[in-house]
Amino acid sequence: MGFPKDEATGDYDSLIAQAEAAVEALRDTYREQLASDVAALEEVWARFEGGAPAEAEAALAELHGIAHNIKGQGGSFGYDLVTEIGASFCDYLRSGMRISPDERNIVHMHIRMLKTVSENNISGDGGDTGRRIAEKLNVLTGRSAG
Protein backbone atom coordinates (compact mmCIF):
# COMPACT_ATOMS: atom_id res chain seq x y z
CA MET A 1 0.00 0.00 0.00
CA GLY A 2 1.49 3.32 -1.08
CA PHE A 3 0.86 6.87 -0.16
CA PRO A 4 -2.12 8.52 -1.81
CA LYS A 5 -1.12 10.57 -4.82
CA ASP A 6 -1.77 14.26 -4.93
CA GLU A 7 -0.75 17.06 -7.26
CA ALA A 8 2.68 17.38 -5.66
CA THR A 9 3.51 13.69 -6.12
CA GLY A 10 4.03 14.21 -9.85
CA ASP A 11 6.34 17.11 -9.07
CA TYR A 12 8.37 14.93 -6.68
CA ASP A 13 8.63 12.17 -9.25
CA SER A 14 9.84 14.71 -11.79
CA LEU A 15 12.40 16.14 -9.35
CA ILE A 16 13.66 12.65 -8.52
CA ALA A 17 14.02 11.84 -12.21
CA GLN A 18 15.92 15.09 -12.77
CA ALA A 19 18.22 14.37 -9.84
CA GLU A 20 18.91 10.85 -11.11
CA ALA A 21 19.71 12.23 -14.57
CA ALA A 22 22.07 14.79 -13.03
CA VAL A 23 23.90 12.09 -11.06
CA GLU A 24 24.23 10.00 -14.23
CA ALA A 25 25.69 12.99 -16.09
CA LEU A 26 28.13 13.54 -13.22
CA ARG A 27 29.06 9.85 -13.35
CA ASP A 28 30.24 10.38 -16.94
CA THR A 29 32.24 13.39 -15.82
CA TYR A 30 33.67 11.35 -12.95
CA ARG A 31 34.93 8.68 -15.37
CA GLU A 32 36.88 11.41 -17.14
CA GLN A 33 38.13 12.77 -13.80
CA LEU A 34 39.25 9.32 -12.70
CA ALA A 35 41.24 8.88 -15.92
CA SER A 36 42.83 12.28 -15.33
CA ASP A 37 43.64 11.40 -11.71
CA VAL A 38 45.21 8.10 -12.77
CA ALA A 39 47.33 9.96 -15.34
CA ALA A 40 48.43 12.34 -12.57
CA LEU A 41 49.35 9.38 -10.36
CA GLU A 42 51.41 7.91 -13.20
CA GLU A 43 53.19 11.23 -13.72
CA VAL A 44 54.07 11.52 -10.03
CA TRP A 45 55.07 7.85 -9.99
CA ALA A 46 57.52 8.44 -12.83
CA ARG A 47 59.11 11.30 -10.88
CA PHE A 48 59.16 9.22 -7.68
CA GLU A 49 60.63 6.16 -9.37
CA GLY A 50 63.38 8.11 -11.12
CA GLY A 51 63.91 10.79 -8.50
CA ALA A 52 66.45 11.36 -5.80
CA PRO A 53 65.70 9.95 -2.36
CA ALA A 54 65.42 13.50 -1.01
CA GLU A 55 62.43 14.07 -3.31
CA ALA A 56 60.63 10.89 -2.23
CA GLU A 57 58.75 12.47 0.66
CA ALA A 58 57.22 15.18 -1.55
CA ALA A 59 56.30 12.67 -4.25
CA LEU A 60 54.68 10.32 -1.72
CA ALA A 61 52.71 13.23 -0.25
CA GLU A 62 51.51 14.15 -3.73
CA LEU A 63 50.52 10.54 -4.44
CA HIS A 64 48.63 10.47 -1.15
CA GLY A 65 46.75 13.68 -2.01
CA ILE A 66 45.58 12.32 -5.35
CA ALA A 67 44.70 8.92 -3.84
CA HIS A 68 42.74 10.68 -1.08
CA ASN A 69 40.64 12.53 -3.67
CA ILE A 70 40.06 9.33 -5.61
CA LYS A 71 39.01 7.54 -2.42
CA GLY A 72 36.57 10.28 -1.51
CA GLN A 73 34.90 10.59 -4.89
CA GLY A 74 34.57 7.02 -6.16
CA GLY A 75 31.70 5.77 -4.04
CA SER A 76 29.66 8.90 -4.70
CA PHE A 77 29.45 7.94 -8.35
CA GLY A 78 29.01 4.19 -8.04
CA TYR A 79 32.70 3.25 -8.12
CA ASP A 80 33.01 1.47 -4.78
CA LEU A 81 36.06 -0.50 -5.93
CA VAL A 82 37.85 2.77 -6.73
CA THR A 83 37.11 3.94 -3.20
CA GLU A 84 38.40 0.65 -1.78
CA ILE A 85 41.64 0.82 -3.78
CA GLY A 86 42.02 4.49 -2.88
CA ALA A 87 41.54 3.72 0.83
CA SER A 88 44.12 0.93 0.67
CA PHE A 89 46.53 3.25 -1.13
CA CYS A 90 46.04 6.07 1.41
CA ASP A 91 46.46 3.72 4.37
CA TYR A 92 49.59 2.23 2.86
CA LEU A 93 51.17 5.59 2.10
CA ARG A 94 50.32 6.93 5.56
CA SER A 95 51.95 4.00 7.31
CA GLY A 96 55.55 4.63 6.22
CA MET A 97 58.01 6.22 3.79
CA ARG A 98 57.68 3.39 1.24
CA ILE A 99 61.07 3.65 -0.44
CA SER A 100 62.33 0.06 -0.49
CA PRO A 101 61.95 -1.80 -3.80
CA ASP A 102 59.16 -4.00 -2.41
CA GLU A 103 57.32 -1.00 -0.98
CA ARG A 104 57.66 0.89 -4.26
CA ASN A 105 56.22 -2.14 -6.05
CA ILE A 106 53.15 -2.04 -3.79
CA VAL A 107 52.74 1.70 -4.41
CA HIS A 108 52.93 1.06 -8.15
CA MET A 109 50.49 -1.86 -7.87
CA HIS A 110 47.85 0.50 -6.46
CA ILE A 111 48.34 2.84 -9.40
CA ARG A 112 48.14 -0.04 -11.89
CA MET A 113 44.95 -1.36 -10.28
CA LEU A 114 43.33 2.08 -10.44
CA LYS A 115 44.36 2.33 -14.09
CA THR A 116 42.85 -1.09 -14.82
CA VAL A 117 39.56 -0.10 -13.18
CA SER A 118 39.51 3.22 -15.02
CA GLU A 119 40.40 1.85 -18.45
CA ASN A 120 37.86 -0.97 -18.16
CA ASN A 121 35.17 1.23 -16.57
CA ILE A 122 34.71 -1.22 -13.71
CA SER A 123 31.98 0.21 -11.52
CA GLY A 124 30.36 -0.89 -8.29
CA ASP A 125 32.41 -3.37 -6.31
CA GLY A 126 33.81 -4.85 -9.51
CA GLY A 127 32.33 -8.30 -8.96
CA ASP A 128 34.84 -11.16 -9.07
CA THR A 129 37.51 -8.95 -10.62
CA GLY A 130 37.05 -6.40 -7.86
CA ARG A 131 37.28 -9.05 -5.18
CA ARG A 132 40.53 -10.38 -6.68
CA ILE A 133 42.01 -6.87 -6.84
CA ALA A 134 41.00 -6.11 -3.25
CA GLU A 135 42.34 -9.45 -1.99
CA LYS A 136 45.67 -8.96 -3.77
CA LEU A 137 46.09 -5.47 -2.32
CA ASN A 138 45.09 -6.70 1.15
CA VAL A 139 47.74 -9.42 1.00
CA LEU A 140 50.42 -7.03 -0.29
CA THR A 141 49.68 -4.32 2.28
CA GLY A 142 48.86 -6.57 5.23
CA ARG A 143 45.50 -4.80 5.42
CA SER A 144 42.68 -6.95 6.74
CA ALA A 145 39.79 -7.57 4.38
CA GLY A 146 36.44 -6.24 5.21
Image: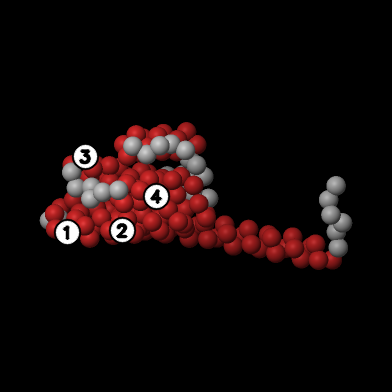
- Please tell me which of labels 4 and 3 falls first in the chain: 4
Q: Which mark is residue 86?
A: 4
| Residue drawn at (31%, 51%) of the image | 94
Give the amino acid type for the residue marked by disc 2 in the picture.
Answer: Ala
Residue 75: percent from left, percent from top: 50, 52
Q: Which mark is residue 55?
A: 1
Q: Which mark is residue 78?
A: none
Residue neighbourhood size for the residue with mark 1, other residues' Cα within 10 Å, grouped as few (<14), some (14–19), many (≥20): few
**Callout 2 touching callout 4 (CB < 8 Å):** no
- Please tell me which of labels 4 and 1 falls first in the chain: 1
- Please tell me which of labels 2 and 4 falls first in the chain: 2
**Callout 2 touching callout 3 (CB < 8 Å):** no
Q: Does 79 sit left or right of 52 as displayed?
A: right
Q: Which residue is mark 2?
A: 40
| Residue drawn at (21%, 57%) of the image | 57
Q: Which mark is residue 102?
A: 3
Residue 79: percent from left, percent from top: 49, 49
Say what secondary structure mark 1 lies in: helix
Say what secondary structure mark 3 lies in: helix
